[in-house]
Amino acid sequence: MHVAMKAVFPVIIEQDEDGIYIASCPVLQGCHTYGRTVQEALANIKEAIEAHLEARMLMGDPVPDVRMVEVEVA
């Protein structure tokens, strides 16, 4: 039986010069997508992260250990 694992990954959303929202997951190399709205970009990056993790599992690669840390800059 396959048991689903829940995980939280950081996502960065930026708007480009054409108004398109670019979403990326910085801890998963090459995992990025886009959308016409923030909501569409978030839905797309969620699918991209799921596909990325599934590919890692199929290849036997480990899932990165994600730790969120805030850094204060003056």
Image (tube, helix red, strand yellow):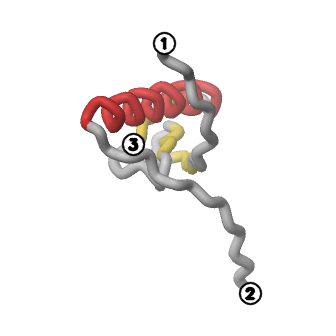
What label sits on residue 1 in the rendered view? 1
Whole-percent x and y of residue 44?
Answer: 49, 27
Image height of 1 relative to 26, above or below: above
Q: Is residue 54 left or right of residue 68?
A: left
Of labels 3 and 2, the one closer to you: 3
Discs 3, 2 touching: Cβ within 8 Å = no
The residue located at (25%, 36%) in the rendering is: 59
Whole-percent x and y of residue 43?
Answer: 56, 25
Discs 1, 2 touching: Cβ within 8 Å = no
| Amino acid type, mark 2 | Ala
The residue located at (36%, 51%) in the rendering is: 29
Which residue is farthest bottom?
A: 74
Whole-percent x and y of residue 36?
Answer: 53, 28
Q: CA distance from mark 3 to mark 1?
A: 28 Å
Q: Is residue 27 left or right of residue 58?
A: right
In front: 39, or 9? 9
Q: Secondary structure at mark 1?
A: loop
What label sits on residue 31 in the rendered view? 3
Q: Secondary structure at mark 3?
A: loop
Q: Earlier in the sequence, mark 1 or mark 2?
A: 1
Q: Which residue is mark 2?
A: 74
| Amino acid type, mark 3 | Cys
Of labels 3 and 1, the one closer to you: 1
Image height of 33 relative to 3, above or below: below
| Amino acid type, mark 1 | Met
Of labels 1 and 2, the one closer to you: 1
The residue located at (62%, 60%) in the rendering is: 67
Q: Earlier in the sequence, mark 3 or mark 1?
A: 1
